Image: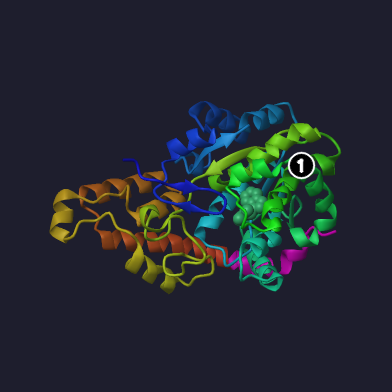
């Protein structure tokens, strides 16, 4: 029997069958044809695309149509501030930066502080504000162009957003929201309304430019249900449909089958953006789910399984050198590379990446105001 998995904006669990998810959601795979077209326009393909870490889309072809006609699009993504940023969050943002650089386009970065306030019993607005300001440092550290990037907290940009959220909410029935998100009688009213706030930035390009302007949303696939609603509404309000380009989830250290995606609230098996090299190394040594055999003798003889090995999975996200990655894969599979050695190498690659991130995060402290959009 195929195992059950759940993917909604509020829950991601189980071993995800991404092919099946594409069919269930009715999104499109990023196939060779569209990747070739993207490559032609961007000049190259990010390794996230070659490795199918970004693997699906909706309406991405219309973005390319527009771009090929000389029409610039906007990028839009977001981060709900409920805790520290971890490696899994940085993945779509790194891809977003790549798109911004390649296409030289504007980016709207939403920080829906009310989302986490509404959905999390224990978070106050003081907490979400504190996390927002911390998270913004990580966002800026990714290297977005300050001239072309605007970051806003919903509660600080509400004067502009609220009117449009109301226009959107008027076009979505409770029944549609229930069937999209599985709401029931115990959800609070704010939770039900929230999706309208997440739709607004998809229309802001057109609102800000004063002419039809397309929007591309790079995000993990759990956010797609919001944008189904966005696109139900778009034609009713006379806006172009929003396009999405969708990523898989970075698993927690114990692997997707044990604990699902990496999650800020599970400290032991999450690698935070601000973690020290010692902490990273020790977490990987202790917790990273291994595809190795029980004994060194067996491993040498039979080889390991890189496909389930978390250290190897992390390398697919962070090691750009594809030849080196392939070599690691083959050496682990043949038994030449031992689990301890693979873990050391993964820790080294992650620490190199984080060292740079943390340096840029320090520098970001003085740059926040350049990015902020407020009413
Ligand atoms: N809901 C997202 C979260 O829980 C935050 C978010 C807001 C977002 N707007 C977005 C994510 C657009 C991706 C794209 O983190």
Q: Quadrant of residue 289?
A: bottom left
Residue 141 visible here: yes
Q: Is residue 257 above or below residue 133?
A: above
Residue drawn at x 46%, y 64% is 270
Residue 93 point in image, percent of width and height: 59, 52
Q: Is residue 270 left or right of residue 197?
A: left
The front one of 16 and 71 is 16
Q: Is residue 314 above or below residue 73?
A: below
Q: Is residue 194 left or right of residue 319?
A: right
Q: Is residue 257 left or right of residue 75?
A: left
Asked which secondary structure carries label 1, the reply is helix
Residue 134 point in image, percent of width and height: 64, 68
Magenta extent: 359-375
Residue 73 point in image, percent of width and height: 72, 37
Q: Is residue 348 above or below residue 40?
A: below
Crowd rating for badge 1 (residues with CA inside 10 Å; few <14, some 14–19, many 20+): many
Residue on which disc 1 sits: 203
Q: Main secondary structure of the magenta part?
A: helix
Residue drawn at x 69%, y 35% is 232
Q: Quadrant of residue 123?
A: bottom right
The front one of 19 and 354 is 19
Which of the image's four quarters has the N terminus? top left
Residue drawn at x 27%, y 45% is 330
Q: Is residue 372 magenta?
A: yes
Residue 43 point in image, percent of width and height: 59, 35
């Amino acid at each position: 029997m195929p195992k059950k998995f759940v993917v909604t904006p509020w829950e991601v669990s189980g071993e995800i069958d991404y092919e099946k998810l594409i069919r269930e959601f009715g999104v499109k795979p990023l196939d060779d044809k569209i990747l070739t077209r993207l490559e032609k326009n961007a000049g190259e393909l990010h390794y996230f695309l070659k490795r199918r870490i970004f693997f699906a889309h909706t309406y991405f072809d219309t973005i390319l149509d527009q771009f090929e006609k000389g029409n610039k699009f906007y990028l839009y993504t977001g981060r709900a501030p409920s805790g520290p940023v971890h490696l899994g969050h940085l993945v779509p943002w790194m891809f977003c930066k790549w798109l911004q650089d390649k296409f030289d386009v504007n980016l709207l970065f939403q920080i829906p502080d009310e989302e986490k306030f509404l959905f999390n019993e224990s978070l106050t607005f003081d907490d979400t504000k504190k996390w927002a300001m911390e998270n913004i440092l990580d966002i800026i550290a990714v290297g977005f162009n300050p001239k072309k990037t605007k970051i806003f907290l919903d509660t600080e940009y509400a004067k502009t957003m609220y009117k449009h959220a109301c226009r959107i909410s008027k076009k979505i029935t409770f029944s549609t929201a229930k069937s999209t998100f599985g709401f029931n009688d115990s959800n609070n009213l704010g939770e039900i309304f929230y999706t309208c706030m997440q739709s607004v930035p998809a229309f802001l390009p057109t609102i800000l430019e004063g002419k039809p302007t397309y929007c591309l949303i790079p995000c993990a696939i759990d956010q797609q249900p919001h944008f189904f609603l966005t696109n139900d509404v778009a034609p009713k309000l006379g806006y172009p449909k929003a396009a999405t380009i969708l990523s898989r989830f970075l698993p927690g250290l114990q692997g997707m089958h044990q604990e699902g995606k990496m999650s800020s609230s599970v400290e032991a098996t999450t690698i935070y953006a601000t973690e020290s090299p010692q902490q990273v190394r020790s977490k990987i040594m202790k917790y990273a789910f291994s595809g190795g055999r029980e004994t060194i003798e067996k491993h040498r003889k039979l080889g390991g399984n890189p496909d389930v090995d978390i250290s190897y999975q992390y390398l697919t996200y962070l090691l750009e050198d594809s030849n080196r990655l392939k070599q690691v894969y083959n050496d682990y599979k043949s038994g030449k590379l031992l689990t301890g050695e693979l873990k050391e190498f993964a820790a080294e690659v992650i620490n190199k990446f984080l060292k740079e991130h943390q340096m840029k995060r320090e520098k970001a402290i003085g740059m926040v105001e350049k990015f902020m959009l407020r009413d």
